[in-house]
Image (tube, rainbow, N blue to C red):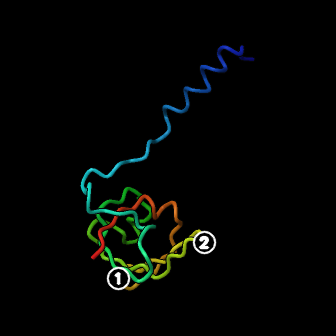
Amino acid sequence: MLSPRNRVRLRNWGRSLAPRPKRCNLCPGDCREMSDLPSGSKAIVLCNHDTRTIERGLYLGARLEIYRNEEDEPNLIVAVQDSRYVLDRRIARSIRVKVV
């Protein structure tokens, strides 16, 4: 069993190993979060650090269109080339785009 003093030390130790959110250094003024775009808008991906969405086609320079983005729903629908994806709003906040 751990003493209370050692328990406090171990509680803070794991927090330093957690991944920190990555910042976008490439586009300081032009980029916006994908979750902020209105429905029907077209954009180009400028910054994306999520490997799952990169494999789906949301790589840097990809053109996309927002089909449905309603604030009361947890998901938004995005079209990339000829396919459509349902993205969680948390993932869409991490993708930075430029409106075309």
As shown in the figure, which amino acid type bears the numbered disc 2? Answer: Asp
Residue 13 x, y percent position in the rendering: 55, 26
Q: Where 88 falls versus 49 (above or below)?
A: below
Mark 1, residue position: 81
Residue 47 x, y percent position in the rendering: 32, 60
Q: Where 5 falls versus 90 (above or below)?
A: above
Q: How far is disc 2 from disc 1 in space, using C-alphas?
A: 26 Å
User: Residue at the location (42% across, 58% down)?
Assistant: 94
User: Residue at the location (38% across, 65% down)?
Assistant: 54
Q: Secondary structure at mark 1?
A: loop
Mark 1 closeness class: few <14, some 14–19, many ≥20 residues within 10 Å: few
- Residue reaching furthest to the right: 1
User: Residue at the location (50% across, 38% down)?
Assistant: 18
Mark 2, residue position: 72
- Residue reaching furthest to the bottom: 82
Residue 77 x, y percent position in the rendering: 49, 77
Which quadrant of the figure contains the N terminus? Answer: top right
